[in-house]
Amino acid sequence: MSRLWNDPPLKPDGTLDYAQLTLAEICEDVTESLLDRVYNGGDHELVPYLDDLPEVEEIAVGVSGSEGLVGLMEELLRQEGEDPAFGSPRTREVIGRIVRALQEEARSSA
């Protein structure tokens, strides 16, 4: 089981410290957030993002996310404060950028 669910690295404000997460953990966090909004929130427009995410199991173990990906995750965290349903065009644009970054970094980690 991932440490995201039992001992996640947190910043002083209580949010996830993405700089301390592995690439697989970041992918797992994004996947879980999108799944929640699709299955619990009924937002099926997010399914293409889910479909495009790399499989967590295919990402090399222990590889860190890039500084750019960490920055995108921080940006999504800020957007989520204003748009918890991930419905705004700006939030969707950030999610798309995160998915593309995860695809590229997962390919590079293999």
Image (spheres, helix red, strand yellow):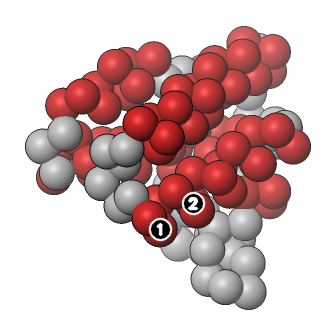
Badge 1: residue crowd in 10 Å (few <14, some 14–19, many ≥20): few
Residue 92: name its quadrant.
top left
SS under mark 1: helix
The quadrant the C terminus occupies is top right
How far is disc 2 from disc 1 in space, using C-alphas?
7 Å
Residue that label 1 marks:
81
Does 44 appear above or below 67? above
Furthest residue in direction front, as rendered: 89
Q: Are marks 2 and 1 in contact (CB under 8 Å)?
A: yes
Residue 56 seen in the figure? no
The percent coordinates of residue 90 (x first, y second) are 49, 40
The type of residue carrying mark 2 is Leu
Residue that label 2 marks:
77
Does 71 appear above or below 61? below
The percent coordinates of residue 40 (x first, y second) are 16, 52
Furthest residue in direction right, as rendered: 67
Q: In this view of the protein, which residue sits in the foreground, 94 or 61?
A: 94
- Is 99 displayed left or right of 109 in the figure? left
The type of residue carrying mark 1 is Gly
